[in-house]
Structure formats: structure tokens, C-alpha cells
Amino acid sequence: MSKSLTGLRYRLEPNPGHERVLAQSAGACRWLWNWALAYRQDVWLAARSAGATGLAGSVGYVHLSSLLPGLKKQYPWLTRAPHHALQHALRDLDRAFARFFVGASGYPKFKRRGDREGLHFPDPKQFEVEDGWARLPKLGWVRYRRSRAVVGKVRSVNISREGKCWFVSFCVQGDFARANLGLAPVGLDLGIVGSVTQTDGTVERFPVATPAEEKRLRWLARQASKRTPGSCRRRRTLDRLAKIKRHIANRRRDSAHKLSTRLARTHALIAIEDLKIRNMTRSAKGTPADPGRNVRAKASLNRRMLANGHSDFRRMLAYKCERSGSRLLAVNPAYTSQTCSQCKHCAPQSRKSQADFRCVACGFNLNADLNAALNILAAGLAVSARGGSETIPAREPRTHPRARHKPAGSTGIPAKAALAA
């Protein structure tokens, strides 16, 4: 029996005492991250001023964790936070620098209050999980909403905060394989009006913000900008803003989960277009010397594209296909919306509008998204017939744009961060 890891997320229901300890512990982890980041910058700058090169002068997790006992004596309030959570904050910073050095992400930033606050407990000896209850260090037994059973062995626990709500995530090891029905292959076209269009003509529209919700979000954003930073009124306004955004995101995520589960358990092969969302949603404002055109229209298009959550849907589909045994293929999306699925003639003039496709060569008429889905499926079947290995991994590596400009072997910090230090 093969074992795999998965995450199970639940709503945490702490009492006022628990909330106070959680907020203090999350603040301590945030402070330690910022202190360690500033310390690493100071050490790096001191080494460079002394003439060191390469990785000389850099410090890692081992050195920083050895300084933790001294910090607790200097700042006694650090002892109120779980020791393992503080250590994990240093490990997270070390991983962030490792990803930065290989060009997989940007330079680590200082954290602000309310910026992805949370705690992590990596040692199974430090916690217990029972039906609807979890015993955690410094907290004791805390209730969570048991919306589904915790199946498997809990390896670690992560606590996160969204607005006023706390959530607990269990990293569980077990057998999560699901049988696949093995139906006919399907191609998926990702769009804005129709979030996902299948080759059988089914169009799935992920729920986005309604006009009333968009109006409310704009009003709350204007109100937050008028409040004094750090005031209680501004914090309450931001909490209301975060609550609406969380509701919209949960609604979209629920729809994406249901669709990805149904597709992964039904079809033996799924072809999806390999969209580069990061590149497609870049700003068009340009530079002061060379300003862009139609900036407002491009910004609106970017918002509508990101609101569909295509990256989340692709990630869900990838790991669910691994569990069900189906195959997920990435297809180059170039010209799939301009090519006729019948005669394979490619011409921009065939795309009459966003929804209408009429081939200028053979006169074939079809919905533009459905025509693109048929082309994506044909390309996926061609890759499969050739024995290609374009299967999408469940955890796709991301390359940060900085990696394209950083010289080989460079391990320095950006000049902007160095000046800030």
C-alpha cells in the first residue's frame, strides 16, 4: 500500500484565552523572522565590507537557532511562544534564502502584522489529535470543527489566521488513492467568461465576486485608506474587507475542488493548456520613458483572469490525478484559439469574437472556447501517442523573474535590501 501526504484543513474554535496565546505566539514568530532577516543582512554586509566573497559571511539555521536561548533571556516574552514554532520560523527563513539563491523566488521580505500569521508544530510528540479536539503546546486542548474525519497518521500541525478566524491544518500520511472510471480523454480550455470548457461542451463557471460584493469591496477599501494606520477603526474595516474576500475565495475554491475531483476520477487522460498566468497578468503600464497603452483595460483583464483561480485549479487537478491514476498533460496553448479543429487551418481572422469561431478556409462554425478545447485534446493525444512525458507534477517548480537576470554563481542580496538594512 503506497503512502502519501495530504493536508486537512479545519476551522479552529479557540476561546478568548487561546486566541490571546495564539496572537502572542504568532507575533513572536513574526518578530523572530524579522530579527533573523535583519541579522543575516548585517552579517552579510559586514563580511562584504571586510572583503569576503561568495558565501563567506552568510549564516544559516544552525547558527541562528544557537542564538535563540540568548534571545529568550534578553526578551522574556519570547518564552510564551512554543519553542518548536520559533525554530520553524528560522527554518522557514533558511528555506526562503535557499530558494532565493537558486532563483526560485524573490528575496525574503520583512513581515507585517496580519501578513500570513501562523504557527507550525513539526514534532508529533508535541501534539495530540482526537475527535474534534487538538492538544497543542502552550495551548492545551483546543476545539476545531470536525467537518470530516482525520484519516491517517498526523505528521505535523499548522495554524494560520485569516482576519479574525483561526484555522488548523493537519499534514496526514495515508493511502488516499481513488479508483478511476477510465472514460474517454477530455481537453480543457481555460478562459474568463467560461472558466473551464470541456470537449463535450460542458462549461464550468467558477463563482466570482458579484457586482454588489465588488461595490462593497471598493467602499471598504476607500474607508480603510482614510483610517489612521494602527487605529482600531482601521483594523475593524480591514477585518470586514478580509471577511468578504475570504468568502469569495472559499466559494471559488469549493467549485474548483468539486470539478477537479470529478474530472480526475472520471477520465483516464486530461489535456490542459499550459498557461503562464504570471506572465499573462503582468502590468501594462510600462516605464516613464516608454509608457504602456490601454493600461486600465489590461488591469481589468488581469483582475478578471486572476479571479477565476486557474492556477489553483491546475494544482488541484495535478495531485488528484496522481491519486486516481489518471494522466494530466500540459499542452502549449499557442494558436489553439485560432486553429480550426476540423481542417487545422490557422488564421487570426477565424476568431470573429470572444465566443464565435468561424473558419475562413472551410466555414466550420463553433463556440471559440469549445473549438480551442478540441485542439487542446488533439495535441494532448498526439503527445500521448508519441510517448511524451509532459505530465504536470503535483508541485510544479516556480522560477522567479529575478533568476533570468541574476548572474551565475551570484549569492548576494539585492542592493535595495542592503540599503534598507
Image: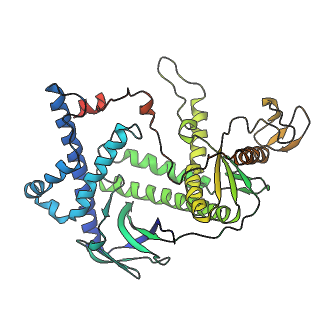
Q: Position of residue 35 (x, y in %)?
A: 20, 47
Rendered view: 219 above or below 361: below
The single residue placed furthest to the top in the displayed view is 289
The one nearer the camera, 381 or 79, is 381
Rendered view: 392 above or below 264: above
- The residue drawn where x is 18% and y is 35% is 57
Rendered view: 126 above or below 317: below
Q: Is residue 242 left or right of residue 192?
A: left
- The residue drawn where x is 22% and y is 65% is 82
Q: Where is residue 55 in the image (x, y as percent from the top left)?
A: 24, 34
Q: Is residue 229 visible?
A: no
The one nearer the camera, 359 or 265, is 265
- The residue drawn where x is 24% and y is 43% is 37
Quarter the C terminus occupies: top left
- What colour scheme governs how the chains and residues are painted in the rendered image of this protein? rainbow
The one nearer the camera, 321 or 117, is 321
Quadrant in the rendering for residue 418: top left
Rendered view: 34 above or below 48: below
Q: Where is residue 89 in the image (x, y as percent from the top left)?
A: 27, 54
- The residue drawn where x is 33% and y is 45% is 96
The single residue placed furthest to the right in the displayed view is 362
Q: Where is residue 176 in the image (x, y as percent from the top left)?
A: 53, 70
Quadrant in the rendering for residue 275: top right
The one nearer the camera, 56 or 241, is 56
